[in-house]
Image: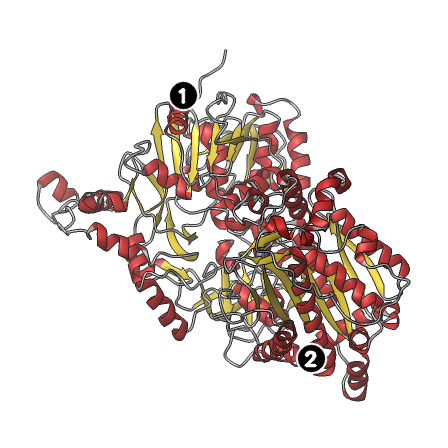
Amino acid sequence: MKGIPMTTLSLPMKRWVFAGLLTAFSGTLTARVTPDFYEGETNPDLPGPGQVLQYPLGDRAARHHEAVAYLQVLDSLSGRVRLMDIGQTLEGRPLLVCFVSSEENIQNLETIRRNMELLADPRKSPTGAELESLVAGTPVIAWMMYNVHGNELSGTDAALQLVYQLAAGKDERILEILRNVVVAVDPSQNPDGRERCLAQIQQWSGLLTVPDVQSIQHQGTWPSGRTNHYLFDMNRDWFVLSQPETRARVHELVRWNPQLVVDAHEMGSFSTYFFNPPRKPINPLVHSSIRNWWKAFSRDQAQSFDEYGWSYYTNEDFDDWYPGYGSSWPYFSGAISILYEQARTAGSRVRLPAGSLLTFREAVHRQFVSSLANLTTAAKNREALLRDFIQMRRDALNPPQGSIQAYYVLPDDNPSRVLHLMNLLAAQGVEVYRTTEPVTLKNLTGYRDRQPVTRELPRGCFVVPTAQPRRPLIETLMAFDLRLDNDFLKEERESLEKGEGTRMYEVAAWSLPLAYAVECYASRSRVPASLERVEDSKRQDDWTESEKTYGFLVDFQDDIGLHVLLALMETEYAVRVAEKAFSIGGRYYPPGTLLLRGHENPDNLASDLKTISRETGAFIRGVSTALCDSGPDLGSGHYRLLTRSRPALLTGPEISTSEFGAFWYLMDHELRYPHTILTVSGLGRADLRPYNVIILPSARGLDKQVLEKLKKWVENGGTLVAVGRSAALLAEKETGMSRVVLRSQVLNQLSEYQAALEQERAIGRFPIDSLAIWEGSGSVFKGVESAEEKKGPSAEEDRYNQRFMPRGSFVKAVVNREHWLTFGMPERLPVLAATSTVFLAKSPVEVPVRFAEAESLRLSGLLWPEARTRLALSAAVTRERLGQGQIILIANDPFFRASTRGTLRLLTNAVFLGPGLGARQPVGW
Ligand SMILES: [Zn+2]
């Protein structure tokens, strides 16, 4: 995509170029000598970045097309450079990796890659003298990545200088790097975000460059360039692989097996420069060898900065506990990864508190010096790095006795979701297998039952053995409950008690089996022999048509059922959904099964469904009668007619970018279902009648008028789905829109809600004793006893307890499977909880999903006792009627970073079943 040529702003550009001369205007700006990026002889035939960009590098941030053009020039002129296209952004910009090394290495690039593949897999690598010669002749691979957050600009420009220096340099330091290292430079990990940021800077730049960090020139507007097109933070997406940019990147890293990975960022303008080692907590699956190398790399890096007298720090602020960062994911495949954080200058310059100016050029220079320092360390330690890498991969192949030997994932519950998970692992270089015959295994542990169980695993059960070169990756992604060490817990607890906030940079839990809510077991026993390797698997279609057809039944347990429903909704088929379980033709169908009656649909129904089944692999059965073996017959009113969903999704600066982004991506990219995006600020003017569902992601706050308008719309038959903080806003006393309440606002009425809960839990438990009922004798059922009058905590105590809220831990929720909001969900559901808000509800509000009791609440991640007590038995999801419509509140983000597919069903059921099942629709005529 072509950008607006910057030459159209020639006047301000010139002013920036000569900014250093404007001392009279800039007041305290003192003339400091700007050091060259590098001192050393270079090849005069290769143009420096400034010659192609037509301005001195670092005067401003290069546009993506300018960076691409410069790298293309070097690619065409230098035998040390090879530019590779690895994919495309969502907005169609090229994703590039620029390989730089000695001419010889560049000529042998594919051989080096293959040799590295051999070294990376000790099962395939040679031994003895052959291995020694491979080690002697193979350069290390360093993967240098910049600008994943599009508004952290300096990295890309530093990458241009780095490629130039390596391509043109003639001095021994550069030549040593070229001989020993294949440098792969990913100059811009997020071109769409960078371009969004640069367009904003261009928009808000005038004749003067204001060095005030608060100015819009520096801050930009919403949405910022940090995220990609769908507003995803791609520095959290590394193991979720939801975005094409991440998928392309991980694909290359899996192919190349680098020993060093660098991820260069920017942070607040008033900071200095950060590089690894990271602060605690350190993920226990990071190999000790990597921890040692951090020290070696940081020593050299510090020395390079000391030469310039620059400030920097290590071991603070940034931890790598979460494996979804560019600086953490590579650890688990045996790479030393290093995070850089440079103080932000937004492409120009900022006034620092001490009075001096920090310029963009200085920021670029620091990123460049850091990169070169790390590459020098890598070059000097080529052999040791390779040997340690090989050793880490060997260690990975030998899980200690008594440790987990394999994860088993049963496909029964939700075959397409399980396949999604298996393909996700395979895309990260994990080997996935399947059992070729039934096998009985003892002492299996699951996350649902902590007690070991014995299970017969069917043929076709997925197996992920841990004895693989990427064992740490498997263990960090699949472990049910990775635990923080006591030293860190003590530190964290104290910090919270003092009111200084959490020491965790990120969520505490991410376990994929829990996020996907699939049935998974860990086993410490030997892996059975009867396995076959599975590569990118697809589902087979599951289609049966009966001779004489009354109608068709479509499975809605499996996630693919939703895709079938949406295809049918879009073509205006009359789709019904079973409220109750039934059996027909000797087969059991759970609630939620879709029914298409022949007489309610067009004649081409059968052929359309056949096509859908072939394309999706969905389970579809033709039935010749409406008479069921058990449960309501197919002509019963318990098969409710669905209404086509016409959703609107709210967005704007008030709305959580990550929640909105994930929902937008879901509707647009995954489901491809027509939807309207409305801004909260434009809601006052909007005509809401075209929509029957409105999705409201977490909002910082909502105007009274907006709430009033939404309320009227709900009363007229709308389905309002509010998530997280928006759910809390609707439940607040002051808003009064929902009958759900916030626990913190009813502390003196807790016993009332406890009594209502007892009533709810007593449903169906009444012991039918005919003597007691008819004769008044026999056992006496005491009825529902009102809960003990227990004084709730004071408001101050409650506020204190809120400090210990979960920050992204999996907790157990109990699902009412008869409620339409939970169709297709397991009875016990892991919910990623990340809020101090606790919701309470009583009849007539329905609570289809409720958090479990305190003792069994925690599944994975840190959950302090205060949080357990507050959260236990509270409402996770509520549904209530309002006028002709309904309000659905979901306490926690159900599609966190596009990874929690287990809870996603709550959102999709609300959006696509809601208009037909919970809201009253008029009958047209
Ligand atoms: Zn960043």
- Is residue 861 visible in the rendered image? The answer is yes
Between residue 408 and residue 717, name the one nearer to us.
717
Which residue bears the numbered disc 2?
Answer: 385
Q: Which of the labelled discs sits on residue 52, or is there none?
A: none
Which residue type does callout 2 highlight? Answer: Leu
Around disc 1, counting alpha carbons within 10 Å, would you say few (fewer than 14), some (14 to 19), or many (20 or more)? some
- For the N terminus, the quadrant is top right
Between residue 279 and residue 781, name the one nearer to us.
279
Which residue type does callout 1 highlight? Answer: Asn
Q: Quadrant of ligand 1?
A: bottom right
Left or right: 111 in relation to 664: right
Left or right: 244 in relation to 665: right
Q: CA distance from mark 2 to mark 1?
A: 67 Å
Local SS, label 2: helix
Label 1 CB less than 8 angstroms from ligand 1: no
- Is residue 589 visible in the rendered image? The answer is no
Label 2 CB less than 8 angstroms from ligand 1: no
Left or right: 474 in relation to 837: right
Q: Is residue 237 positioned above or below 767 on the image?
A: below
Around disc 2, counting alpha carbons within 10 Å, would you say few (fewer than 14), some (14 to 19), or many (20 or more)? many
Q: Is residue 536 positioned above or below 642 on the image?
A: below
The image position of residue 860, as x and y in percent, is 43, 62
Residue shown at the point (61%, 42%) measured from the top left: 670
The quadrant in which residue 762 appears is: top left
- If you read the primary sequence from the N terminus, does the residue marked by circle 2 or circle 1 appear first? 2
Q: Which of the labelled discs sits on residue 716, or is there none?
A: 1
The image position of residue 18, as x and y in percent, is 71, 51
